[in-house]
Image: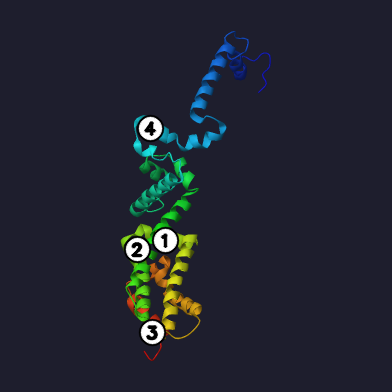
Amino acid sequence: MRHGSGSSRPSRMLSISMRSSPQDPHWRSRRSKTMRHQGQIDAKLFGSSNMIWDALAFKRSGMARTRGDERAQRFAATTIDEIDEGRERILQVAERLIRRFGHPKSTMANIAWELGTSRATLYRYFPTKEALEEQVCLRVASRTLRHLRDILVDEDASIERLRVLLHEVGQQTSSRMILEPHLHHLFVEAFRNQWHVATDYLREISALIEDVVVRGQADETFVPADPSKTTKFILGSMLVFVSPGLTEQLNVDDPDLSIDLATHVQSVVNSITQKTL
């Protein structure tokens, strides 16, 4: 703002400029010391401009080392194995918090606090919170798929293999909804937003079903047909017990609207079984 010659209010910018004027005999000396001091701080924290990200990522770790916090020191990963180990620790803590509080309330800040590190460190492993949540979902889905493969080992007859597989697929979804509601809601989110983990989960279940179908057709237990089409028919018939969002709709009090899992599975198995059996 421009003031007239008669103005009684001095310019604030002018007064600040006068206080830091180069005409001050000590100005250059103070400025030089300040810049050297700031440069020492920058060099100590960052070393170079290429290390700014690492400095941000390990700021909390550096502070923790001063306090003797050993948890944060473990995040100074320098090898592939240590990076994988750090990633696994993050997923373990994230899953535990999601189980307890739900994925909306399990923030990156909460997870970082539990680990004794910073959010910047977490983002080195997972670019977004959604990416971290998807990996947690993948951990749970992988355990479910391993369980499904294990139970098939104990069954020889094709009819029983298919019945047990389909029943357990539905049971896993229903049990998660009742016993682990927060994890169930994470799966609902994954299916609703078509995360890769959801499509991969369906693809793996489809592969397990098709393997049972092929064996059953080979021993003439099941009706001879295109295994791929038969598998799609079975998976489509079971989708209400596989998709967590649809499974919620089965949880109704009206018996006329409810669907019994065991009865439904038996109907699906009967529909592809040779009538002579």
Q: Nearer the viewer, mark 2 or mark 3?
A: 3
Residues under labels 2 and 4: Cα distance? 40 Å
Is label 1 in contact with label 4 (beta carbons under 8 Å)? no
Q: Residues within 10 Å of mark 4 (few under 14, many from 20)?
A: few
Of pointers 4 and 3, the one earlier in the residue sequence: 4
According to the picture, the residue beneath numbered tag 4 turns out to be 65
Q: Nearer the viewer, residue 108 or 215?
A: 215
Q: CA distance from mark 1 to mark 4?
A: 38 Å
Of marks 1 and 4, the one in the foreground: 4
The amino acid type found where label 2 is placed reads Arg
- Estimate the x, y position of residue 75 in percent, counting from the top left: 41, 40
The quarter of the displayed image where residue 73 is located: top left
Q: Residue 176, labelled with which disc?
A: 2
The circle drawn on residue 187 is 1
Number of the front mark, 2 or 4: 4
Tag 3's secondary structure?
A: helix
In primary-sequence order, the first of circles 1 and 4 is 4
What is the quadrant of the N terminus in the image?
top right
Q: Are marks 2 and 1 in contact (CB under 8 Å)?
A: yes
Q: Earlier in the sequence, mark 1 or mark 3?
A: 1
Mark 2 / mark 1, whichever is N-terminal: 2
Residue 147 image offset from top left, x and y in percent? 35, 65
Q: Residue at x 61, y 16 (%)?
A: 17
Q: Tag 1's secondary structure?
A: helix
